[in-house]
Amino acid sequence: MSNSASLTGARLWAMAALRILIGWHLLYEGIAKLWNPYWTSAGFLADSQGPLAGLYLWMAGDPGRLTVVDVLNQWGLTLIGLALILGVFSRFATLMGAVLLGLYYLGTPPWPGIESSAPAEGSYLIVNKTLIECVAMIVLWLFPTGHQVGFDAYLTRGGNR
Amino acid sequence: MSDQNDPKAPEDKSPKQSAGDSGSGAGVDRRSLFKGLATIPVLGALGATAWAKRSADDAKRQAIVDELGVTGDAPAIIDRLTSRPPSDRINVGIIGYGGEGEALVRAAGFPAPDWVDTQRQAQINDPRNRRLEEYLAHGDLNLELTGVCDLFDHRANRAVAASSIETRPGGAPAGRGATRYQRYTEMLEDPDLDAVIIATPDHWHAQITIDAAAAGKHVYCEKAMTRTADEVLPVVNAVKESGIKFQLGHQNRQLESHEKAREVYEKEILGPVTLIETTTNRNDRWGAWVWDIHPDGNPDTIDWAQFQENAGHDVPFSLERFFRWRCWFDYGTGLGGDLLSHEYDAVNQIMRVGIPKSAMASGGIYHYKDGRDVPDTFQVAYEYPERDLTLLYSATLASGRGRGKVFMGHDAAMEVGSGVRVLAEPLSTRYADMIEEEVVDPDRPLLTYRPGFRGLDAVTTATEEYFASRGLLFTYRGGQRVSTLWLHIKDWLDTIRFGGEPACNIDRGFEEAITCHMATMSYQLGRKVEWDPVQQQIV
């Protein structure tokens, strides 16, 4: 990318607001899981049906592996959320966030022929909110704002993005 | 709003420079400093609201816990370690090595060699399959399998092969090998034999238990305890007079969630319970007792005459009857003894209901018209007027939708499976104030108890899930998956070694047998039957 330099005016604040709101969502998801001693990704992994079902079942099939997955989820969400809100390492965080959300999406994608056992709060066909949030994360990666609204301003000396 | 970099842009050598300028060196002006820190209040807001929410949730939970007086504690890991010196070894014989017999002998520490091979291969084919690993992680119960009795040569030979296997759980040494007996009475003559596991069809349970008790051998007997109501009291008397340790094979007694459900009931969280609904919902041939007929089974390899000895009628050799005996009242008790017995025993474990005053059953053979005479659809209503309670049992072998086990109380309802879920009644008396104050939400569980596991069995079949939800396969102790059969056998062995009463002793067996026979008799007679506690008979 030649230049993702700087947004101005309303564009900057709209993009920064998107970043902060998604950050809020992920951060609270993360700490809610950290605070809940009974939380585990086991149910989500076991219900997995899409292209990664085999991998997810493998992850759920062993307490050791599951613990690693659980910790990565809890802290991944928390740290990505924190980074997005504060605008610190925000480019790396948005990229990781896009990957994480992509993995959630592929867990049980709302594709024709895949029936999720978890009840959805809306009606989805191929596109759901997770996919949209994932793409929004990619947009944030392409149009970073952390160096303008956030701590990246102090970290990106000389603009070494 | 204009960006502070804009005016500089035309002078920039590189557009990238613009980002750096705002935050580097001495160029941090007030405005960019403000922007850099702009989001901190957002974080503060999230932290404050999240904390407030958490505190409110905790306060609600604490209020509920204080009111209910239950804890989230799981049962103790595993009490009473098995004594392992060879001098403490218990010599056990197996009588009846069919499906259940094999499962019991395996749980006792002696897997059939071909089972081990099959599991090894299954693990190679699918690395997620950890059955063998989990099996071998169970403790050594310090047993020796010394005697084998089965009327089918193939099964007897397999049991003998299992008795000297080297691959054993808990690092147990290889078994020394068992003797095969043609009749169980010959086995009982062995003075070194301490105990027997009876897993024959139901029509042999009473006779073998009585003979074993007379010989002073401890007994683990599969349910149903007897085939007929008339056999119940002689078995009870024989066991009590001999002083042997008797365990009935209701391994649900070991289920973590049942213990928790009992605590919930005893703490009167449910309020008065007037109705309990229990169910069996199966929809597969295996679950309807249409079991495989072994290709080696024939009149030369099966002792048909002995099989028929205690049966209801004398009939010619039949492979169906031998291998699918549960389909006939001549050998078993149908749904009453096979599956109602588990549901009833679970309720008896949780609420100590004992024998009901009356039973009214109905049903029919509506799906499996394969020559069987036991119903495949079966409903029973038991009345406990002294406890103001009705116990319902509803079963079908031709539809699998889960209906669970529900205890309906005035203040709350409890669903019991592999976990426990309690929901407050919207018009509860006890929780009226808490519902009013929105501390308790009737739409959400008042209490949820999930077994302490973090990990799933990735290879579980539908039938296994059925068994698992009723605690017939495994439960959890200290977060580890443990076979309930193993726990139930261990419970029995502990009482032999250290004294005390087994979890499902002869008194519980008596209640189970009478209660189940009441249902079967009501179905067969086509009328309501009652228990006469004075005459000790069903009328």
Image (cartoon, rainbow, N blue to C red):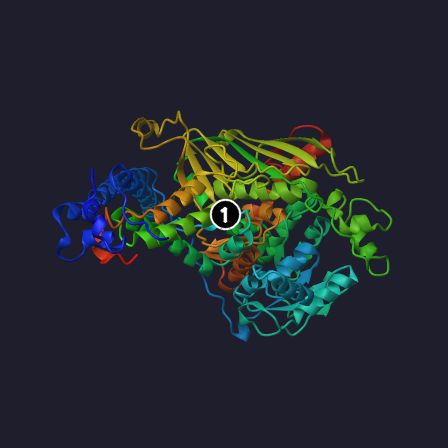
Circle count: 1
**Front residue (pair B35, B364):** B35
Residue that sits furthest to the front in the current view: B10
Q: Locate residue B127 relative to residue B428 in the image: left or right.
A: right
Q: In the image, residue A106 lies at what x, y percent?
A: 50, 47
Quadrant housing residue A18:
top left
**Front residue (pair B434, B339):** B434
Query: Mark 1 packing: few (<14 Cα in 10 Å), some, or many (20+)?
Result: many
| Subunit bearing disc 1 | A
Q: Is residue B387 above or below residue B163?
A: above
Q: Locate residue B535 relative to residue B314 in the image: left or right.
A: left
Q: In the image, residue B88 lies at what x, y percent?
A: 54, 71
The kind of residue on which mark 1 rests is Gly
Residue designated by label 1: A107
**Front residue (pair B488, B72):** B72
Q: Is residue B230 above or below residue B411?
A: below
Image quarter in which the N terminus of chain B is found: top left
